[in-house]
Each structure stands twice: as C-alpha cells, then as structure tokens.
Amino acid sequence: MTRIQHVALWTHDIERLAAFYARHFGAAVGERYVNAARGFASRFLSFEDGARLEVMSSAQLQPATPEPGSERVGLAHLALSVGSPRRVDELTAQLRAAGCAVVGEPRRTGDGYYESVVLDPDGDRIEITV
C-alpha cells in the first residue's frame, strides 16, 4: 500500500508557518529538529487524521521566493478538508479577519468540490474544502 507520508515546504520562518497551521487548522507542532552542521532546521506538523506537513529552512539553500499566490511548477496547493461547507465559509472568514489573502471565495467548483483558496504566510495556496 502506498500513501503520502508527508509533504514538505521550504520557508524562511519555521515558527511563523508552524503557528499559522496550528492556529487555523489544528496542526500539532512537533519538536524542532536542527542539524547545525548543514544549517538545516525543520518541524513536523501533524493533523488529526494522521497527515503531516514538514516546514523546513536552510542556511545553505536559498529557496526562490515567488510572488505570493503565484502559479509555478511544483507544488500547486495544499487541499485541507474541514468537513462541511459551513466550516469552509467560517474558516475563510476567520482567515480573512486575521489578514490572510483570500484568492478564491467559497464556491462550488466544476468538479463538485466546495472550496475557497487562501494564502498561508509564505504565499502558498491552501484550498479549504469539504
């Protein structure tokens, strides 16, 4: 059986990104891992259903910083299911009030999803869906 074990995101600020996913999506923030010799640090964020997100930074690697919300080759978005259309609406409003950019208002898509699209603090697209 194959399943995705985790998805990893480069960031310039691990703590800011970890706090965002913990506050708004209920992620449990794991211990900070540091490899000083490589200038690497990371934290795993665990969600209730077992999914995990790793947020990473490196002093040696300087990841490109695209425009917030821009479409690019590679990771297009994270889709996080919150259980109901009502919760999609509530969380979208909560994120807007917290200053997050909403780049796709709650709607029913052509393929049947009910979703909105917001940007995390690094400008990564998050689909909030049922």
Image: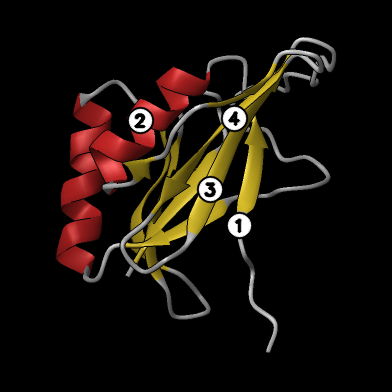
Q: At which x and y percent is residue 117?
A: 44, 47
Q: Is residue 68 above or below residue 54?
A: above
Query: Is disc 1 in contact with disc 3, using a CB cutoff of under 8 Å?
Result: yes
Q: For the residue labelled by badge 1, is the local secondary structure a helix, a strand or a loop?
A: loop
Query: Is disc 2 in contact with disc 1, using a CB cutoff of under 8 Å?
Result: no
Q: Which mark is residue 42?
A: 4
Q: Which quadrant does the N terminus fall into?
A: bottom right
Query: Is disc 1 in contact with disc 4, using a CB cutoff of under 8 Å?
Result: no
At x 29%, y 20%, the residue is 99
Badge 2 amino acid: Phe
Badge 4 amino acid: Ser
In the image: residue 107, left or right of residue 89: right
Disc 4 from disc 3: Cα separation: 10 Å
What is the quadrant of residue 37 in the picture?
top right
Q: For the residue labelled by badge 2, is the local secondary structure a helix, a strand or a loop?
A: helix
Instruction: Work out whether residue 16 or residue 33 is closer to the camera in this orientation and state it.
Output: 33
Q: Residue furthest bottom?
A: 1
